[in-house]
Amino acid sequence: MIGRLFDIAVAMAAFGVLLVLPGFGLQWVLARFRARSRTEDTADEAAGARPAATDEAAAASDAGTGAAGTSLVLAIAWSVILVSAAGAVLLAFAVFSAEAVAVFALVAAAVGILPFARFALRLPRHALAAIPVAALALPWVWLATRDGFRPASSFQWYYWNLGTQLDQAGGIPTFVAEFGDRVRWLPDYVLFNILSEGYGALAVGMSESAALSYWRVPAALFGVLMVYLVQRLWLGRAAAIGGTAVTSATTFYILKFNAYKAEPMAIALGLVAVWLVVQGIRGRRVSWILLAGSVAGVSVGVHAIGATVTAMLLLAAGTVEWLTARRPWRFSLAVVLMCGGIAAGAVVVATGVSLQGRAVVASDAARPGVVGGVDPTYTFFRRTAGGFEDAAPRGRGTRVRAAIDRPWPGIDVLEGRRGKAVLAVVALGLLLALALGGRGLRKGVVSVAAFGAVLAGGMAFFAVSFDTYVPQHTGIARFGSYLPLVIGLAVGPSIEGFLLGLRRVRVRPGPRLAAVVVAVLAVPWTMMTVMAPLRSEPRVNGGKVGPEFGETDERLGPAADQAIAALLERAGPGDAILSNASTRGTIEFLTGREAPLEGRQPFIEDRSFLLEVNDLLLDTHEYFLDPSDPGVLERLDVRWLLVAADPSALGANFSYSSEDTPIEEALGRSLVVERLARQPYLETVWRGGGIGLFRTRTPADPVDQVGEADERPLELILSGAALGLVLAGVGVVSRRAVSRAARRVAVTRDDAATS
């Protein structure tokens, strides 16, 4: 236990070196250098320390978060831009390595150590908020210290493998091996892969499995912190603590942050952009709004869906804040906000052109289409889930209900009485907030409501605009999974409304007492709520997560570990491994060998490629039912077969050897190892615990997993130069707009004083 806690501390430090310390250093450097040629106020504004704005505007923007929160958010924003840019340069010039990213981060972090120390000295003043917020990450610490590096059945393994492919090639590979073919490296998460590779190199003294498992602790804390800071834009400390606690207990938060994935990182970065935009409008800080646009653009290169949904919150909150700004400033702020949007788009396009091979991901997302009356995207979804019989997807309404019915584990808001009562209480608090709250609280209520409306509009757009399961599923299910976030964010203003109601009846708890009471009530409830569905049954191969999540959370057992050890002892570096378990990158992660079926979800790839993959999955299914013909093995250059009677033994939820009926399915799974053991072209290497490891008697051709690096210096230089010109241009336009508005306000004020 002590050793694991130490490793978690190392993971936290690695996260800080990547995403916190470089930004503190950059703020300090900018402030020192720009002070030589500009006034102190201008220098501080450029560094993000103090705006060149009126005292009234500065006070409005700092309200709630204080200097500590401001410094931290700016440090995170600058850090992610710095490290991402450095990684992009390394990729484009084909000199990328995890160690190079780590070295850059360490050098940049060294400059930020002293500024961060000054920041840390201010933290005791915020102990009433810092302690509860930190405590909300404890369930993830508890989870990470358990055996098994759960969850084994998620795509976290595939995401990690994407990053290691960059390291193996020294840049963006010209191809990677997937589904028996050479295909383009998946570029959708390239900036996340840069950050995660740096993290892996900085997480010294632990295995890759441990680093992957412990990632969720700093990631969850990052998300909790940003939810709190965004809530503090509109709420007092007590309500923000309560709202953050309840939000971090939602099924949304548990599902998104319970693994090494790109999406939670994009969500947290999106919340950084929300904070910067709202504070930038309040303080009329041009640099913050443009920085928000840049961060939002980077988050698209981390995870497009997470970035898109948080951009909806940014749009809602930014619009509400702009509409409530003082009238003389509205036009200039509208110009600045448009410039921020241009900056975001420029970052997205520059990343796409220089690294991803296309300007925007939407060009790929519109590809799927029905072929011969069959939806190939749903066919792939079904076959990777072990379903080879004809079936239609659930109706749109059913999928929407599934996305919203349980915002918290065990609380059904559509059919359960308790869930409906919870919603009624939250709604009552929101009404109190609107009736009794001040301007800031009302802006918070309207912002959350507008976010929900925009999210619902996005779901409706995808539901009616596309005929195929993907991208229709993206809107209904993927966007719909964020609905609990909307409900969770509404709880904070609701708590504030009830606190205001207490004051109206002459019950006036002080702000400190209210914060303590809310923290004492909300934080323990949140911890128990989060831990309950994550606590698995004590089985060898894993246990159920719970009906709210619809899947098992499997762990590898001793038999799987022994089979993999036997494989590593005998397999060559170019050998390919086929399994009947529908794993998500686990075998490639643990063995370093090619597993042809552990590829991407090719929903938005070239249509012919998707059709070929579907045919391959069907051929594989038929092979495991009748392995007399080794054609699939020859097609995929397979040398090894790692087969399990129950797929959960290999950390999977589904099997390619499943049958059509429950009885046949059970018999087929129990007999698949026996069927393969009887084949004359296979040699049994290891058997035990329902798992079999087989080797073909005829050697197979070695498989090249990763191609050479694709050098893209010209694309990077041209797109970087264009990006620099765009950012410089929007900066000039934004500052001129604000300066003109400031002069008009000053003239009006002088005229009023003289009259």
Image (cartoon, rainbow, N blue to C red):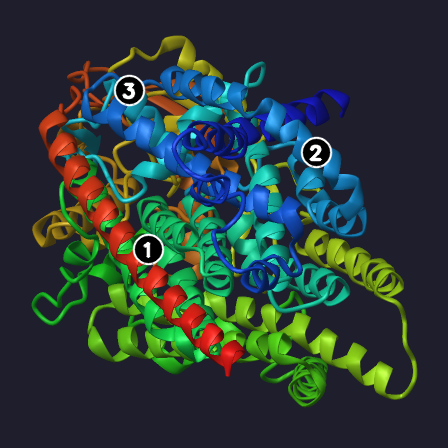
Position of 308 relative to 192 (above/below): below
Quadrant of res 540: top right
The nearer-to-camera label among 1 and 2 is 1
Q: Depth-wise, is mark 2 or mark 3 nearer the camera?
A: 2
Residue matched to label 1 = 735
Q: Residue at x 40, y 52 (%)?
A: 292
Count of numbered labels shown in the rendering: 3
Seen as rendered, the residue at the extreme front is 754
Q: Report whether 409 appears left or right of 183.
A: right
Q: Please give the label number shown on residue 96.
A: 3
Verify CB contact (< 8 Å) between mark 1 and mark 2: no
Kind of residue indicated by mark 1: Arg
User: Relative to 491, is 715 above or below?
Assistant: above
Q: Are marks 2 and 3 in contact (CB under 8 Å)?
A: no
Q: CA distance from mark 3 to mark 1?
A: 37 Å
- Residue annotated with mark 2: 120
Secondary structure under badge 2? helix
Residue at the location (10% across, 54% down)? 607
